[in-house]
Amino acid sequence: MLPIGASMLALTGVLALACFAKAFGISFLAMPRSRHAKQAREVSPAMRVGMGGMALLCVALGLAPMLVVSALDRITAPLTGTSIANDLLSKGGLALTPVMGEEFASVSTPALGVLLAVITPVALLGAVILGGTLRKRIYKTWGCGLNLTSRMEYTAIAFVQPIKRVFSTIYQPTIKLETEFLQESRYFTKHRSFEVHIEPMFQKYLYDPVVTFTFAIADRLRVIQAGSLHLYLTYIFITLVLLLLITG
Amino acid sequence: MAQSMTLIILQTVVLLVVSPFIVGLIRKVKATLQCRRGASTAQPYYDLLKLFQKDVVVSSNASWIFTATPYILFASTLAASLLVPLFVSKVPLSFAGDIITVVYLLALGTFFLILAGLDTGSAFGGMGSSREAIVASLTEPAMILSIFAVGLTAGSTNLSTIVHKTALLEGIVTDPPPHLMALAALFIVTLAETGRVPVDNPATHLELTMIHEAMVLEYSGRYLALIEWASALKLLLFLTLLSNVFAPWGIATAPDPIWMTLGLAVWLVKVSGLAVLVGVIESMFAKLRLFRVTDLLGVAFILSLLALIFFYTLRG
């Protein structure tokens, strides 16, 4: 089962990657896609500090996950009866390993961080040695001879189109294209509307039934909650008596 | 410590020097099969040197992501390559990560490449990014699964342990069927991940079919050189995985200079052989339509799944 789980995790990972590439890339990169985006201004530092702090914490957690191991162990140790913090750390606490041992698998994000932090400046230096100082020219993107406008850019719908198509069984996309032609000729269109909907699978088949069920139960239970103070006092009294009976 | 550092630096140098040769070799094989003489196998080195010396043109729409991506891609690909055993079965950095780390280091580069494709505002870049996203999401599960099929026989996901144990035939049930199925699956994944025919065509420019080349269309000068070098490294990494995970025999099992030289020679022969095979496949097959790629990668996924089922049933 472990390999299947790992491969499904890989699929989830890449889909999350695509999702964030879309969210960040379409919203923030290249030319602004709407009038509002064009006039967007950076917010005050106070608003950036909050999000920046969270982002930094995420990076820190990624680079030093071993700091959390002992904290989590304090919770799991009483539950499972054994402490595994020492089994999970190797190489002087710099690498994380499963309880099966270092031979099975090991990952050390600090080492990877150092590796990336060493290679990047070396690559920069190597590029300077091979090609001299950087001579950079800023120029507009080539738009096949036309002036590139934001309408020619990729949109979010276009970006996920292949994913939507390949996983169409899950997403169940419905596309509605309505075209109103000119009376004189069907070669010219007067008006065209395009709509895409994705079936919210989890909401429809997982969350919604739970919500409906909860509400139905709540409706039934409302009978005992009639609003009379005396009734509630009776409930408290009965509860007390029952508790005394159970504990006594 | 000193020995580990030497090994790491040696592996870096070997990877950087050999990777353009592999690209040149594949081109040479293709040229020979097309009855051309073709450029020498040293051509990619000249190309890289020339690209490094050229000016860089950056789009006025581009953000810092466009400038940072070549370095991030190069660093992450090289870091991933350092976790894979080349000529000695136990790499010093093996504690830093297993096969899953390799996959995600490569995904880091892919993520930034996808963003860089969107960054310049050209429709080509967006198209390449969008296609890369779907190809990556189909290849990665198959890749993990196929390596796991081999990893199970070695009882580890750590590449060094897998290679070391397979090389010594230690504690391994050598069942050819699951091994060969996983090998076939990883070979398909290799073609898809490194942008080769029948999934992508590395020799094309400005065509509506391209994937990788579309994403890097706006790059020039040293940025393009770094990206090309990173692509060559990625290709070499996958060929190394194919040869060393599935048939590591000949690799040095201890850091001894003589055995390491022999291991290096054997590894060179193996990856060159695989490169020739890739070149032959590129000459024999046409590129698939984008939505037919799904079927091919589905085959890879099913093959590795079958390899796993075979493994469990043969084990009993």
Image (tube, helix red, strand yellow):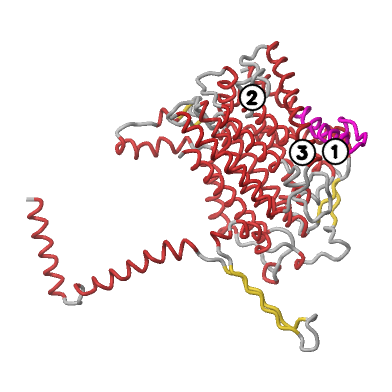
Left or right: where does residue B227 sit relative to residue B167? right
Q: Measure the alpha-carbon separation of dots 2 and 1.
A: 36 Å
Q: Measure the alpha-carbon separation of dots 3 and 2.
A: 21 Å
Chain bearing tag 2 is: B
Q: Amino acid at mark 3?
A: Ile
Q: Which mark is residue A178?
A: none
Residue B62: quarter of image: bottom right
Residue A179: quarter of image: bottom right
**Mark 3 and mark 1 in contact (Cβ < 8 Å)?**
no
Q: Which region is colored magenta?
A: B16-43
Q: Which mark is residue B52?
A: 1
Q: Which residue is mark 2?
A: B247
Residue toward you, A235 or A7: A7
Q: Amino acid at mark 2?
A: Ala
Question: Dot 2: what SS?
Answer: loop
Q: Which residue is mark 3?
A: B281
Residue toward you, B58 or B135: B135
- Is B235 contained in the magenta span? no
Callout 3 environment at 10 Å: few (<14), some (14 to 19), or many (20+)? some
